[in-house]
Amino acid sequence: MAASQSPTVVDAVRRELEIQDQDVDGRPVVRTTATLTTNVARSPAQLWPLLTDPARLADWFGPVTGDLREGGRFVAPDAHGTVLRVEPPHLLSVTWEQHGAVDPLVIRLDPEDDGTTSLRLRYTTLSDRERFESFGPGLRAVDWEIALLGLAAAADGWRTVCMTDVPTPTPAWLAGPDGRDLLRAWSVRWAAEAVAAGVEEDTARQGERATTSAYLD
């Protein structure tokens, strides 16, 4: 993929961000809910095993072990969690637990008339106000951008929303020029979503720079 095509790949995912200031035990925190929506070139029934079968998950996401039935516990790369709700082949709800945080994560698959799938990934997280002002929403969101890119690469691409060949986001590819361009573009998009959600632009741009640096430096 040429670097000039990165915006096309970026635009294959639609982003929404909700931000709310809260107080937890006297500590100022920011509650963020991020939604990433895209179209994947397989039906929900074809896509479902890629999200729930450990052998298929290992092909594009990484090793996931444990019990992926409702109520089961699982271990994923850099995280673990509990399966809260499973409605094959349309809904998967889990907790995503890392660094002491327990974030709800919901993936919904809806069929489209052309046989593809509208996929919506939605997660909510709490961040210390200071950390949010330093990094913004992008640091966590870019992880899921990478995951969706990997899923699209494993599932024949996006087809209806992006005709570009989908690269597999291996560490080596992400460290290369095309991957670095895409990481920068994701950081920019999440900074823009932060501004749209009410964050001061200077703060959002600081988060953009910090997120980009965290992935590229």
Image: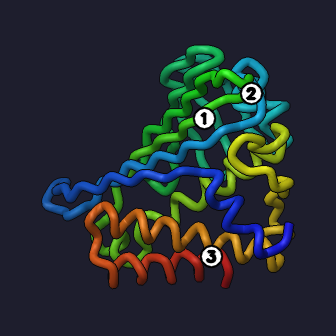
Residue placed at 83% from the left, 77% from the top?
A: 176
Disc number placed over residue 119 in the picture, else none: 1
- 140 left or right of 133? right
Residue type beneath disc 3: Arg
Q: Residue 98's spot in the image, x, y percent?
A: 52, 51
Give the residue drawn at x 50%, y 33%: 106
Residue 103, horizontal then vertical, whole percent? 43, 44
Q: Nearer the viewer, residue 91 or 109?
A: 109
Q: Quick one: SS at disc 2?
A: helix
Q: Is disc 2 in contact with disc 1, using a CB cutoff of under 8 Å? A: yes
The amino acid type found where label 2 is placed reads Leu
Percent position (x, y) of residue 142? 58, 61
* Image location of residue 214, percent across then percent down: 59, 77
Contact, CB < 8 Å: mark 3 with mark 2? Answer: no
Please identify the quadrant where the C terminus is shown: bottom right
Location of residue 25 with respect to 188 vertically, above or below:
above
Q: CA distance from mark 3 to mark 1?
A: 23 Å
**Amino acid type indicated by mark 1:** Leu
Residue 71, above or below 50: above
**Separation of disc 2 and disc 1 at Cα?**
10 Å
Number of residues whose C-alpha sits closer than 10 Å to that of mark 2, classed few (under 14), some (14–19) or many (20 or more): many
User: Mark 3 = which residue?
Assistant: 184
Which residue: 84% across, 57% down? 167
Report which quarter residue 172 is drawn in: bottom right
Q: Which residue is mark 2?
A: 47
Rendered image quadrant of residue 152 = top right
Please name the residue shown 42% across and 81% down the image.
Answer: 205
Q: Residues within 10 Å of mark 3 (few under 14, many from 20)?
A: some
Mark 1 packing: few (<14 Cα in 10 Å), some, or many (20+)?
many
Ranked by sequence position, the earlier of labels 3 and 1 is 1
| Closer to the camera in the image, 67 or 93 | 93
Per the model, the C-alpha gap separating discs 3 and 2 is 28 Å
